[in-house]
Amino acid sequence: ATNIWIPVVCCLLIAAFGISPIYIIIAAGVLGWLYGKVKK
């Protein structure tokens, strides 16, 4: 359950800044890809 903060942070960002969920999905995809590159 270490990734529980990810959806929480996304919800807070959407609520705080009115960010479109589409940008959140794109950012999550990019961050996930970068994280995968770094872990290797």
Image (cartoon, rainbow, N blue to C red):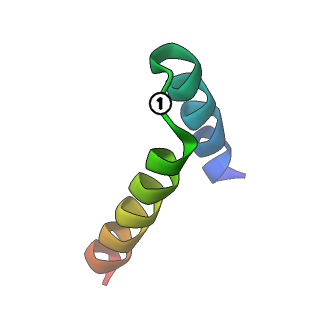
Q: Nearer the viewer, residue 31 or 21?
A: 21
Which residue of the protein is positioned furthest toward the top in this rendering?
16
Residue at 55% x, 27% y: name it.
Answer: 14
Residue 12 vertical placement versus 6 (above, below): above
Which residue of the protein is positioned furthest toward the bottom in this rendering?
40
Query: Could you say where residue 2 lies in the image, as x and y percent from the top left?
Result: 63, 51
Quadrant of the drawing holding the C terminus:
bottom left
Residue at 30% x, 69% y: name it.
Answer: 34
Residue 37 vertical placement versus 17 (above, below): below
Q: Residues within 10 Å of mark 1 (few under 14, many from 20)?
A: some
- Secondary structure under tag 1 reads loop
Query: Could you say where residue 38 lies in the image, as x and y percent from the top left?
Result: 26, 73
Residue 38 vertical placement versus 22 (above, below): below
How many marks are shown on the rendered structure?
A: 1
| Residue 13 horizontal side relative to residue 33, left or right | right
The answer to which quarter of the image holds residue 37 is: bottom left
Residue at 37% x, 73% y: name it.
Answer: 33
Query: Could you say where residue 22 lies in the image, as x and y percent from the top left?
Result: 52, 50
| Residue 20 horizontal side relative to residue 36, left or right | right
Residue at 50% x, 15% y: name it.
Answer: 16
Query: Could you say where residue 39 lies in the image, as x and y percent from the top left?
Result: 34, 76
Q: Amino acid at mark 1?
A: Ile
Q: Nearer the viewer, residue 25 or 40?
A: 25
Residue 33 vertical placement versus 25 (above, below): below
Residue under label 1: 19
Which residue of the protein is positioned furthest toward the right in this rendering?
1
